[in-house]
Image: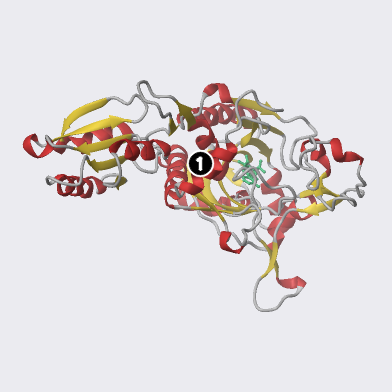
């Protein structure tokens, strides 16, 4: 469903490249399809989002433990999980234009030969019957390429958590209900990736599996649904751009009893799309792993003297997709009162901004660069700082606005005399004079998560 909000994707892709947020993978070789590299500012932004998640889900709670499971797992894991048999998309080929499409998403697909045609209009061309295409990347472990050595790149991080359920529970002596969380790479050989970092073949997930007693799963499902929406709001996402989408029976994944997506309005033709899935997976995964491994994955509940296979409520958000939502949400172009030229701003939440402060000498003389360099070095021990002495001060401010830096600190003619500097705030454009020794605390107090 197209959105009433403008499409800023092309402008964002160009801003991200220009300022070192995101580059196309292997660009000098013509690029790799739908794979992206995070540059100096992008890696900071994505890391801040991941840290924000880790703090909310692991560090600030006593009922969730962290984990970092390996990407490569025993191939039987993916048989047990249902991915070998069921993690497929229906693929159709067009005999005329040679394009490949998902049969279940034809209405939004564009003909590669006639991209000007509206989605769906090219359907008359000659499509093959749908074939099921497995989205897992296959590779070989060890030096022999034979079927016995096939391994998969994981398509979700969740399975690493299920197979470690008892390891974590027994080593931490957690009692149900409790959760296990991890952040890590996942890989899917998507038929129709695209929309920048929205759907890629290599991406990062931030997943949490919450183990609960059977019968309490729907309650926990509702609680996590609300908690996760609150987290997205804490990123600074506009509440009007967020909504839930409940999965219909047809939409439910093979493991899910019930599911909600948290959707964000990306604007333009993309519109509202999933950024996170909250799933009630019941006891599907642990029961299947018991069956396939022959090992019991039961929990012993001392107070009731009962043994059972726990149910799982999962929260699963893409780190890249959350990063894209944050970028789209924060991008704005505006006019500035009294100035002929407008400005482009990334109005990022200060806690997420890759650079917290720009430090500038007003001019390159009278000891100002020395003062500013020393100040920047001092501040760098506490948060990320960018020092810049080239070009007009207005241009230096604009550059920092475009990359979302919340504060710009300028050393001027008065600084050496009274040890003060000015601090300019990105959104309000307000400037304040502050003692140079107080600048660190001033900024820290405003950029803390
Ligand atoms: N373990 C459950 C699971 O993987 P999912 O709905 O398939 O559920 C969860 O994926 C989240 O992972 C999505 O909401 C999205 O943010 C992210 N994601 C999935 N496929 C992706 C892709 N190809 N590119 C980028 N992010 C993706």
Residue 48 shown left or right of residue 121 in the figure: left
Q: Quadrant of residue 284?
A: top right
Q: Left or right: 253 with respect to 5?
A: right
- Residue at image position (29%, 24%) is 430
What residue is pinned by disc 1?
Answer: 175
- How many dots with numbers? 1
Q: Where is residue 147 in the image (x, y as percent from the top left)?
A: 77, 71
Placement of the C terminus among the 4 image quadrants: top left
Instruction: Find ligand 1 in the image and state its quadrant.
Output: top right
Is residue 14 shown to the viewer in this render?
Answer: yes
**Residue drawn at (80%, 43%), measured in percent from left and top?**
114
Residue 144 image point, x, y percent:
70, 78
SS at circle 1: loop
Residue 431 located left or right of residue 93: left
Q: Where is residue 224 in the image (x, y as percent from the top left)?
A: 56, 31
Give the residue at x 61% y 54%: 35
Question: Which residue of the protein is positioned furthest toward the bottom in this rendering?
Answer: 143
């Amino acid at each position: 469903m197209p959105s009433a909000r403008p499409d800023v994707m092309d402008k964002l892709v160009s801003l991200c490249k220009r300022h070192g947020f995101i580059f196309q993978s292997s660009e000098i070789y013509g690029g790799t399809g739908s794979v992206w590299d995070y540059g100096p500012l992008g890696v900071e932004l994505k890391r801040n989002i991941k840290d924000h998640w880790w703090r909310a889900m692991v560090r600030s709670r006593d009922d969730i433990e962290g984990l970092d499971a390996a990407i490569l797992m025993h191939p039987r894991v993916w048989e047990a999980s249902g991915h070998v048999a069921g993690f497929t998309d229906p693929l159709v080929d067009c005999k005329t234009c040679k394009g490949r499409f998902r049969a279940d998403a034809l209405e939004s697909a564009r003909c590669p030969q006639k991209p000007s045609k509206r989605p769906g209009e090219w359907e008359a061309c000659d499509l093959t019957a749908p074939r099921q295409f497995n989205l897992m990347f296959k590779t070989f472990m060890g030096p022999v390429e034979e079927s016995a050595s096939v391994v998969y790149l994981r398509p979700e991080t969740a399975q690493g958590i299920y197979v470690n359920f008892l390891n974590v529970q027994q080593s931490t002596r957690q009692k149900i209900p409790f959760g296990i969380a991890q952040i890590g790479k996942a890989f899917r050989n998507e038929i129709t990736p695209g929309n920048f970092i929205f759907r890629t073949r290599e991406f990062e997930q931030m997943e949490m599996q919450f183990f609960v007693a059977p019968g309490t799963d729907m309650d926990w499902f509702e609680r996590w649904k609300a908690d996760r929406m609150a987290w997205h709001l804490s990123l600074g996402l506009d509440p009007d751009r967020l909504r839930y989408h409940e999965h219909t029976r047809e939409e439910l994944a093979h493991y899910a009893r019930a599911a909600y997506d948290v959707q964000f309005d990306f604007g333009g033709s993309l519109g509202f799309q999933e950024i996170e899935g909250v799933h009630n997976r019941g006891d599907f995964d642990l029961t299947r792993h018991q069956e396939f491994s022959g090992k019991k994955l039961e929990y012993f509940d001392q107070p009731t003297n009962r043994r059972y296979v726990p149910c799982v409520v999962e929260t699963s958000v893409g780190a890249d997709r959350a990063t894209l939502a944050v970028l789209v949400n924060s991008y704005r172009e505006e006019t500035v009162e009294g100035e002929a030229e407008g400005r482009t701003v990334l109005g990022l939440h200060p806690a997420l901004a890759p650079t917290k402060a720009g430090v500038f000498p007003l001019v390159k003389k009278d000891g100002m660069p020395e003062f500013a360099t020393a100040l920047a070095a001092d501040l760098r021990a506490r948060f990320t700082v960018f020092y810049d002495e080239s070009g007009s001060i207005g241009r230096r401010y604009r550059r920092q606005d475009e990359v979302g830096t919340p504060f710009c600190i300028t050393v001027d003619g008065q600084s050496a005399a009274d040890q003060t500097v000015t601090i300019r705030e990105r959104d309000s454009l307000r400037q304040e004079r502050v003692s140079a020794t107080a600048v660190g605390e001033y900024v820290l107090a405003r950029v803390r998560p």
